[in-house]
Amino acid sequence: MIHRFQIGAMRATIVSDGPLLLHAPEKVFLGPGKDMLARPLTDSGQPVDRIRVEQNCLLLETGGKTFLFDNGMGSEKLYGPDSGKLLENLALAGVSPADIDGVVLTHGHSDHCWGTMADDGTPNFPNATLYMSQAELDYWTAGPSGPGMAKSLAGIAKHILPLRDRIRFVRDEEEFAPGVHALATPGHTPGHLAFLFDGGWCLTGDVAFHDPLSYTFPDAESVYDTDREQSVRTRRRLLDRLVADRLSVVGYHHPWPGLGRVEKIYGTYRFVAETG
């Protein structure tokens, strides 16, 4: 699946890597409880027994170069059989992996960077510079411990570390490509980045990764967050900015194609999907 649109003067395409099936909602979002979580899911026509999310990778043309923001799960099937569609959907968009000048990572979780390398250990995007935050690489190379970390660290060793000489670190508020600004949004991971685009858009990564639960329950901590309290603060701060500045949103995990805007309602929020 692909979806073409404009971000200001920049040509943009959402390219799907396919959906993921996560755990039961009450095991992902901590605090509200099963019954409360079920209500907005039912209202939006989503299942209440499993979290299902998309992987909406942004392809952006700016300054004569092509950038890909996050790249999905690659060939791994940790979260169901339907991921790993990025390369075939890039072909559908008429884009060769060799045409991509930069791969920009919000963070180092599997569903955002495990499409970086092919199974034979060669880069899927042979001409691309890899953009990420220094704090993110430092976190993963420090060897964090905990449940599930062994797989995550193996993924970093496969997909990121072999490309150290291609990494270009980006700083908070830096315009590292024409019309593209990095925004430090720590909490989900220590070096998580969102991105602001000229023309009034924001790619939010995993700051608020689920529509509607991340918006209905902004203070609910996520089991996937490295620092859960910081993640809540970051989410509130970013969502308030999206509302105040009337920014349009690219939601990586939101229902296809993940485009919309955010409204604030009595201390919580609502994601309003773009139609058409």
Image: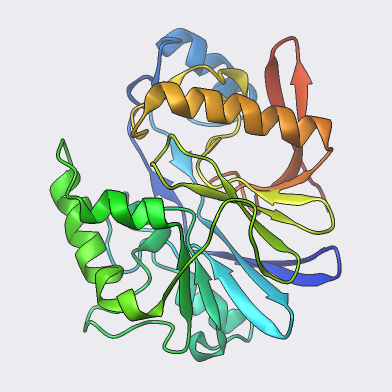
Q: Where is residue 179 in the image (x, y as percent from the top left)?
A: 76, 65
Quarter holding residue 69: bottom right
Q: What is the basis of the colouring in this image?
A: rainbow
Any part of residue 271 in sight: no
Q: Is residue 255 left or right of residue 61?
A: left
Position of 86 compared to 14: left or right?
Answer: left
Q: Position of residue 171 (x, y in %)?
A: 54, 56
Name the residue: 57% across, 21% down.
218
- Residue at 50%, 23% in the rendered image: 232
Q: Position of residue 178 (x, y in %)?
A: 74, 71
Where 207 falls versus 164 (above or below)?
above
Quarter assignment of residue 41: top right
Indicate whether 90 appears above or below 76: below
Relative depth, front residue between 52 and 270: 270
Q: Quadrant of residue 267?
A: top right
Task: State which quarter of the image contains the N terminus.
Answer: bottom right
The percent coordinates of residue 60 (x first, y second) are: 67, 71
Residue visible at 86% across and 70% down?
9
Is residue 257 visible in the rendered image? The answer is yes
